[in-house]
Image: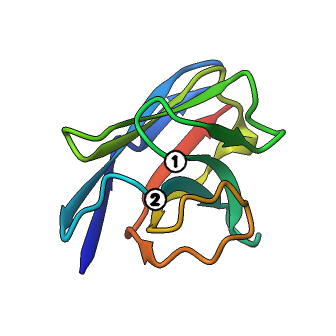
Amino acid sequence: QVQLGESGGGLVQAGGSLRLSCVQSGRTFSGGVMAWFRQAPGKEREFVAAITRDNGPKRYADSVKGRFTISRDIVKRTMYLQMNSLTPEDTAVYYCAADSRPLLIPTLRYTYWGQGTQVTVSS
């Protein structure tokens, strides 16, 4: 079983930055795909970004392109999301997800999920 644990969320002012981390534990895999999703209050969970391997192909939601950067360190079993130029619209619970299939498809049904970390951006 794969466990995922997010960290790095918090409160930041608009225009600020945060870096989220997601660590794999338990049965880990170096391939496959890892992704970030987010869910704002009263809204459905939405895809943010995905990466297939260390410095591998990536995919971003249009709403975060140019502001967010996803990366993955296979040795550390950690995925990151560097978030810059944050706006109040980025306020949400951010979830880490992983799947053994190396597919950069936003609608992929991910097998493993973390518990989420809250990001709040004040105006």
Identify the residue at image location x=47%, y=68%.
99
Res. 80 image quadrant: top left
Nearest the viewer among 80 and 98 is 98
The image position of residue 51, as x and y in percent, is 54, 44
Q: Please rate how many residues cluster around mark 2, counting C-alpha atoms within 10 Å: few if below 14, some from 14 to 19, many from 20.
A: some
Nearest the viewer among 19 and 16 is 19
Residue under label 2, please give it: 32
- Which mark, by number, is residue 11? none
Q: Is residue 3 left or right of residue 120?
A: left
User: In the rendered view of the protein, which quadrant contains the N terminus?
Assistant: bottom left
Q: Please rate how many residues cluster around mark 1, counting C-alpha atoms within 10 Å: few if below 14, some from 14 to 19, many from 20.
A: many
Nearest the viewer among 22 and 100 is 100
Q: Earlier in the sequence, mark 1 or mark 2?
A: 2
Identify the residue at image location x=39%, y=54%.
31
Q: Are marks 1 and 2 in contact (CB under 8 Å)?
A: yes
The image position of residue 111, as x and y in percent, is 47, 79
Q: Is residue 57 left or right of residue 96?
A: right
Query: Is 36 located above or below residue 73 in the figure?
Result: below
Identify the residue at image location x=73%, y=21%.
66
How far apart are the two marked residues, 1 and 2, measured between alpha carbons? Answer: 6 Å
Report helix, strand or loop for mark 2: loop
Name which residue type carries label 1: Thr
The image position of residue 25, as x and y in percent, is 18, 63
Report helix, strand or loop for mark 1: loop
Identify the residue at image location x=67%, y=71%.
108
Tell which residue pokes out farthest to the right in this image: 62
Residue under label 1, please give it: 52
The image position of residue 123, as x and y in percent, is 69, 30
Res. 117 image quadrant: bottom left
Name which residue type carries label 2: Gly
